[in-house]
Image (cartoon, coloured by chain):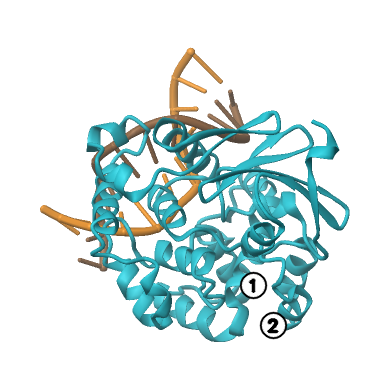
Chain colours: A cyan, B brown, C orange
Amino acid sequence: MGNEALREVAATDFDLARTLDSGQVFHWEKCGDGYAGAIGSEAVYVKQRRNRLHFAGTTAEVIGNYFALDHPLAEICRSFPKDPPMRAARDFCRGLRIMRQPRWECLATFITSSMKQVAHIRQISQTLRTRFGKRQRIINCEANSFPTPSRIAKLTEQDLRACALGYRAKNLLATARLVASGEADLEQWRELSDEALRAGLCDLPGVGVKVANCVMLFAYERLRAFPIDVWIERVLKQQYFPTKRKMTAGQLRSFSETYFGDHGGYAQQYLFHHARVASGRQAIAVNRRYPMFDRKKGRAIHRIA
DNA sequence: CTCCAGGGATGAT
DNA sequence: ATCATCCATGGA
């Protein structure tokens, strides 16, 4: 893996490993001292050395755009609310950027993500890519592009079920057909307002509000979009409403849309990554040991003896 | 409003 | 080796 084959680009205020491990993208694999993956149809190898990215397979422009190296990260972090959980998340997530992913592969991957955990989403993504995408070599690594909408549209539900998609197979197939036929024009949807884009995405089979918000944030650069999954729900309830007995989904949604501001999606990603990586395991372990704490409700179980 | 399909990784025992 | 837990959408 000679360095002479690699080109370089400056990447200040960026943490490649953290960004790839933050639950927004699922197909990059460790290879040597870097990562192999695909950006759209191009196989790419990339590794980080301090404030530079060394890469092969594409151009500096594509790398910079994909990893959003132009996002003013310091300014974005300054726009976060000044509260303890947000500060802790911000300090923990230095260099984490919200990427600009190709729309179709992001949408398709998040359709397969419902009711799945990160490790499993990664496995499904790899299976779809190795079976139906295009295999390429890059440096000494292998990378597979995500299958196009028309490629998936020609498959059967059984083909997809064989990739461990379960009931998601039907949804991915139906959405692939809508996109392949042009009935759902993902590129055109760039023009839509946040509300119209969310509505359009939610009309697709297998896409609810949570998945729609992920796609808006990770593939349409709608940096206000605030996906609420169980991790974020836990964080919001525990950190922001610790005494409130009951918070409805609607209350959490309106709070998150107003409180976190213009870069709410970044705030969400930082809170999510911090909760999942830093405190996730501990919280679960502690809860096993001390069942006085109701992990689901995020508060102590009070017993009146 | 409630209930639950469906399934592989994960961690506890 | 077995067992409980994680999880979002859509339909009953």
**Image quadrant assignment for residue A69:** bottom right
Q: Mark 1, chain letter? A: A
According to the picture, the residue beneath numbered tag 2 turns out to be A81
Measuring from the top left, give residue B10's x and y in whole percent.
59, 35
Which residue is under mark 1?
A267
Q: Nearer the viewer, residue A268 or A138?
A: A138
Residue at the spot x=57%, y=56% of the render?
A24
Q: Is residue A45 above or below residue A219?
A: above
Question: Circle 1 — which element?
Answer: helix
x and y percentages locating residue A83 in the rendered image: 73, 79
Q: Tell me the residue at 23%/57% (across/down).
A: A181
Query: In 3D space, how far apart are the residues under numbered discs 1 and 2 (Cα atoms)?
Result: 9 Å
Instruction: Kindly indicate whether the residues beneath marks 1 and 2 are on one polypeptide chain.
Output: yes
Residue A83, relative to residue A228: is it above or below? Answer: below
Q: Residue A210 location, x and y as percent?
A: 42, 64
Badge 1 amino acid: Ala
Q: Viewer-proximal residue, A164 or A98?
A: A98
Q: Is residue A224 above or below residue A301?
A: below
**Crowding at mark 1 (Cα within 10 Å: few <14, some 14-19, many 20+):** many
**Subunit of label 2:** A
Quadrant for residue A300, please give it. bottom right
